[in-house]
Image (spheres, helix red, strand yellow):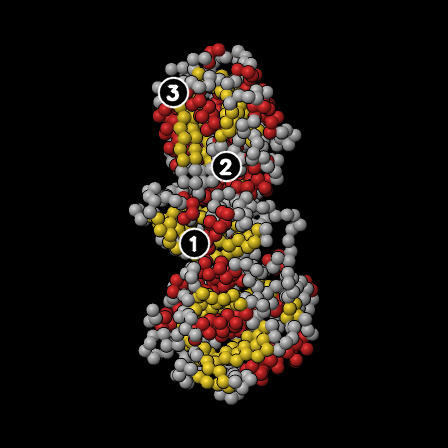
């Protein structure tokens, strides 16, 4: 294993390429809460298929998945959002086709408003592009700590084969200098090499303003003339069978192609469990497999990760020497989920909507109140009183303290955990809200009190004094505009697909987090 | 020693209900005519010096810009001074308080307080969501009207062991009273079992724990205590009133087993009237939901905190109980056309103190009656008015 800061290798066109390694300081992952079994699809349309795919509920999307994975990765790395140089996000489906997707996510995560970053999109290759862009920023010295998130929630056409394989998920990485402790001990894992190739073909496709992603080519044509040749070539560029990686995380658009590529390149397919858990998670898929290759159960060796999409394939070598902080917990996030019926799935994907016009909110997202209120809501801010310490929430409606009337207030980010003071379950919510919708008054750990929507999954069993955690969710899409806010989720049952900080404690090899946090703690 | 500077000399309302066939203006005119007709010695409509209009939310029928200062036109008295008051669910009761202060100021001698509200011109769901999206654009996403009170039921049950049966007993009693009130929206008896079997609306509240959306109007004519006998030999006096505010949002409540605005407003009213809760012969209180009446009777001092549920179940608030509450049927059965609600409650108190309430008449001993509304996004405002038939 080379310990040099830079390695030289021949580029795909024979040009020399210098690659500066960077470290993986912490990782996180997220999966949406629904699981659609292949049998449900088969019951509707015939055909066959095994297993299940992950699916976003109505209040989840690529932004909320990205948020959840990123929160975990930051915690695993021991990095505060305010320390980040920027956010690099890759998704084929940003929630705003044209709009503030990156700004919303960055604000919700608490990055400094001056932080850098990119939103990469256009195909399932977008997650890898975000990783490469962050890597380049670090190598160039333009960034010191980078947050990379790849998330996707592809929508297949109703009645197409894609319904059996199309899933969703998110992978997040905190990248930093290759020798973060400065003592030569080295990070748990480093990105050390990479190669890209393009092939100008149409393949997977979604036109402007189209909702569903579809496959243009015959399956055999895509396999024989596009996917296998391109993936195999870029893997060999990386040194497969010639001293390069001997285990692989691979993009897998239909759930069967990756194993064929791995056989050709030589070595086990470490991304197979991820694919089985959530289906094809598009921009996230190969990167989720990368995390699988960094768990405490994984072989500590070089891992080849190849992403594919939009006629491009990129292969990255990850040198894994120790389990990476957060990897075990991240993989436990992918398990479980609530089964959903086929009709429920079609409705959750937005392909089944009532004829009636939704009732418009009195305060629409286009109004000035949103300009005043959205940032403090995404950032979950309160106003702390200098005189009495009371936290009034949110700041824009509290020019003076609720406790003592004092006027010296400082904006603070609220705690994301607390206990249920009281709650209701609203069963009569008209669209765009979905009943049953709990509304929960939460006494946060920092003494602030807030009221937020709760999880429908908790509607039957929520109780006073339950411990809850707050997670970003999509409240509704109003006049075409996504509206985000926090929801309270009961902290329990780590395998049910909900946000739960306790899930890591029960994950296999939880010790990995401690080791990783130590490495992260050495960095300033 | 009660305040007693102002007297009610006439009051009346129209039958509450889904009044699709009546315009806002027609409802107002109906209530005004009823109040004029109920003035014992007669009154010419031209005798009205000024009017206070109580309408809470014009947007509920798509007319925020009308229905206030132009109401006198619909009443045939265009030209008089008129001001619209809005103060959440206590809009009507606060308009009454302000009307009394106007009279007491000496500026206007005969003042009309008229509450009018159109709740059903828009669809029920639209009316529901009109509230769900007011206030901070994100803190209130998903808060329909029941969400503003149901959390108190959850917590009251948790802390005091209040049961769904106890909540239901409030609805059963008020529906019974509504059967005896020709002005009530609902005039049917219900049972505890029916309440408990009704559909969940906002757990722990069920359909029959909730007041309906009702159109209605009510009017009261006020004058000075000195001039009252020009209009009637049985005036009812304004003994005292109180208003109090609290933080506006639900998450800012310091407690979920009490409505502090009610407690503070009641203290001010009792002090002004020189009486206490034990002096009340009856009360018309804000029962938008069953839990609200239980909170009210505790916060107004009729029963000990936490004992509102058992007291209701035991019949202490029935027509023949220790402290009859909502003999008119309350919001639960009579209805809750917001701006009209408080004015109609005061009309009921007026009838009860004059012992003209027919089958639903309660025993009048000390001669005091209390009227109360609480509301706003997070029960941020409450008004209590106390009336008396005692001159001194």
Pointer 3 local density, CA inside 10 Å: few below 14, some 14–19, many at least 20: many
Do marks 1 and 3 share a chain? no
Residue B225's spot in the image, x, y percent? 43, 15
Residue B188's spot in the image, x, y percent? 59, 30
Do marks 3 and 2 share a chain? yes
Query: Of B103 and B248, which appears nearest the observer?
Result: B103
Q: Is residue B187 visible?
A: no
Q: Which residue is mark 1?
A: A380
In the rendered structure, the residue with mark 1 lies on which chain?
Answer: A
Q: Which residue is mark 2?
A: B289
Q: Depth-wise, is mark 1 or mark 2 nearer the camera? A: 1
Q: Depth-wise, is mark 1 or mark 3 nearer the camera? A: 1
Which quadrant would residue A141 be assigned to in this image? Answer: bottom left
Q: CA distance from mark 1 to mark 2?
A: 32 Å
Residue A89's spot in the image, x, y percent? 50, 66
Q: Which residue is mark 3?
A: B3
Please give the name of the residue rendered at 62% of the width and 29% of the height, measured from the top-left corner: B23
Say if mark 3 contacts mark 2, CB within 8 Å: no
- Quadrant housing the C terminus of chain B: top left
In the rendered structure, the residue with mark 2 lies on which chain?
Answer: B
């Amino acid at each position: 294993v080379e310990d040099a800061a830079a390695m030289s290798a021949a580029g795909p066109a024979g040009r020399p390429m210098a690659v500066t390694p960077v470290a993986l300081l912490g990782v996180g992952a997220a999966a949406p809460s629904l699981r659609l079994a292949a049998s449900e699809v088969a019951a509707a349309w015939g055909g066959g298929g095994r297993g299940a795919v992950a699916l976003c509920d109505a209040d989840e999307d690529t932004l909320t998945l990205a948020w959840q994975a990123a929160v975990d990765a930051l915690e695993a790395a021991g990095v505060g959002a305010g320390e980040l140089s920027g956010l690099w996000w890759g998704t084929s489906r940003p929630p705003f086709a044209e709009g503030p997707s990156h700004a919303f996510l960055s604000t919700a995560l608490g990055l400094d408003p001056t932080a850098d970053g990119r939103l990469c999109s256009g195909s399932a290759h977008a997650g890898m592009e975000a990783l490469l862009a962050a890597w380049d920023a670090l190598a160039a010295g333009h960034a010191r700590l980078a947050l990379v998130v790849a998330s996707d929630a592809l929508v297949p056409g109703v009645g197409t084969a894609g319904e059996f394989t199309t899933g969703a998920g998110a992978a997040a990485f905190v990248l930093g200098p290759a020798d973060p402790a400065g003592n030569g001990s080295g990070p748990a894992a480093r990105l050390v090499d990479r190669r890209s190739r393009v092939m100008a073909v149409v393949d997977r496709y979604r036109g402007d303003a189209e909702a569903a992603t579809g496959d243009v080519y015959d399956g055999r044509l895509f396999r024989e003339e596009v996917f296998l040749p391109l993936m195999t070539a870029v893997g060999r560029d990386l040194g497969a069978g010639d001293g390069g990686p001997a285990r692989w995380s691979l993009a897998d658009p239909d759930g069967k192609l990756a194993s064929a590529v791995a056989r050709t390149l030589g070595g086990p397919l470490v991304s197979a469990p991820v694919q089985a858990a959530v289906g094809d998670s598009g921009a996230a898929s190969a990167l989720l497999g990368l995390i699988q290759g960094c768990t405490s159960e994984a072989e500590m060796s070089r891992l080849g990760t190849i992403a594919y999409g939009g006629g491009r394939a990129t292969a990255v070598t990850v040198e894994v020497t120790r389990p990476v902080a957060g990897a075990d917990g991240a993989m436990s996030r992918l398990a479980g989920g609530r089964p959903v019926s086929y009709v429920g799935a079609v409705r959750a994907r937005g392909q089944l909507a009532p004829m009636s016009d939704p009732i418009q909110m009195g305060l629409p997202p286009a109004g000035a109140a949103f300009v005043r209120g959205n940032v403090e809501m995404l950032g979950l801010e309160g106003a702390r009183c200098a005189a009495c310490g009371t936290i009034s929430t949110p700041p824009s409606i509290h020019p003076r303290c609720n406790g003592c009337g004092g006027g010296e207030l400082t904006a603070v980010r609220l705690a994301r955990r607390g206990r249920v003071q009281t709650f209701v379950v609203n069963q009569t919510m008209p669209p765009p809200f979905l009943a049953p919708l709990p509304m929960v008054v939460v006494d946060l750990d920092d003494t602030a009190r807030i009221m937020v929507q709760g999880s429908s999954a908790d509607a039957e069993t929520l109780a006073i004094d339950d411990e809850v955690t707050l997670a970003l969710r999509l409240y509704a899409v109003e006049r075409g505009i996504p509206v985000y806010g926090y929801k309270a989720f009961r902290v329990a049952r780590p395998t049910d697909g909900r946000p739960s900080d306790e899930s890591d404690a029960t994950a296999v090899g939880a010790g990995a987090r401690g080791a990783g946090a130590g490495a992260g703690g050495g960095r300033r | 020693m009660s305040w007693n500077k102002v007297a009610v000399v006439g009051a009346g309302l129209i039958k509450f209900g889904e009044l699709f066939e009546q315009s806002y203006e027609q409802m107002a005119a109906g209530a005004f005519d009823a109040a004029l007709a109920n003035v014992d010695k007669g009154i010419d409509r031209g005798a009205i010096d000024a009017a206070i209009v109580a309408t809470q939310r014009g947007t509920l029928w798509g007319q925020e810009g009308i229905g206030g200062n132009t109401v006198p036109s619909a009443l045939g008295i265009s030209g008089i001074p008129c001001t619209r008051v809005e103060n959440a669910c206590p809009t009507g009761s606060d308009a009454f308080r302000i009307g009394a202060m106007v009279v007491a100021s000496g500026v206007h001698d005969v003042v009309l307080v008229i509450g009018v509200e159109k709740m059903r011109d828009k669809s029920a769901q639209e009316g529901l969501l009109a509230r769900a999206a007011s206030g901070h654009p994100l803190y209130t996403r998903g808060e329909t009207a029941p969400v503003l009170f149901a959390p108190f039921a959850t917590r009251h049950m948790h802390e005091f062991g209040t049961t769904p049966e106890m909540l239901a007993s409030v609805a059963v009693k008020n529906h019974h009273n509504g059967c005896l009130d020709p002005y009530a929206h609902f005039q049917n008896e219900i049972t505890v079992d029916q309440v408990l079997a009704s559909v969940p609306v906002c757990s722990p509240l069920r359909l029959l724990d909730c007041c309906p959306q009702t159109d209605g109007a009510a009017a009261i004519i006020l004058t000075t205590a000195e001039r009252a006998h020009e209009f009637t030999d049985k005036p009812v006096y304004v003994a005292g009133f109180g208003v109090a505010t609290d933080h506006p949002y639900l998450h800012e409540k310091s407690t979920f087993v009490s409505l502090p605005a009610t407690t503070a407003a009641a203290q001010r009213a009792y002090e002004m009237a020189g009486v206490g809760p034990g002096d009340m012969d009856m009360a018309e209180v804000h029962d938008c939901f069953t839990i609200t009446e239980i909170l009210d009777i505790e916060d107004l001092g009729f029963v000990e905190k936490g004992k509102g549920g058992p007291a209701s179940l035991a019949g202490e608030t029935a027509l023949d109980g220790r402290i009859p509450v909502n003999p008119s049927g309350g919001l639960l059965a009579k209805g809750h056309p917001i701006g009209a609600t408080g004015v109609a409650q005061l009309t009921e108190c007026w009838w009860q103190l004059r012992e003209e309430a027919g089958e639903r008449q309660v025993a009048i001993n000390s001669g005091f009656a209390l009227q109360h509304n609480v509301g706003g996004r997070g029960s941020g405002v409450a008004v209590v008015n106390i009336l008396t038939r005692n001159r001194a």
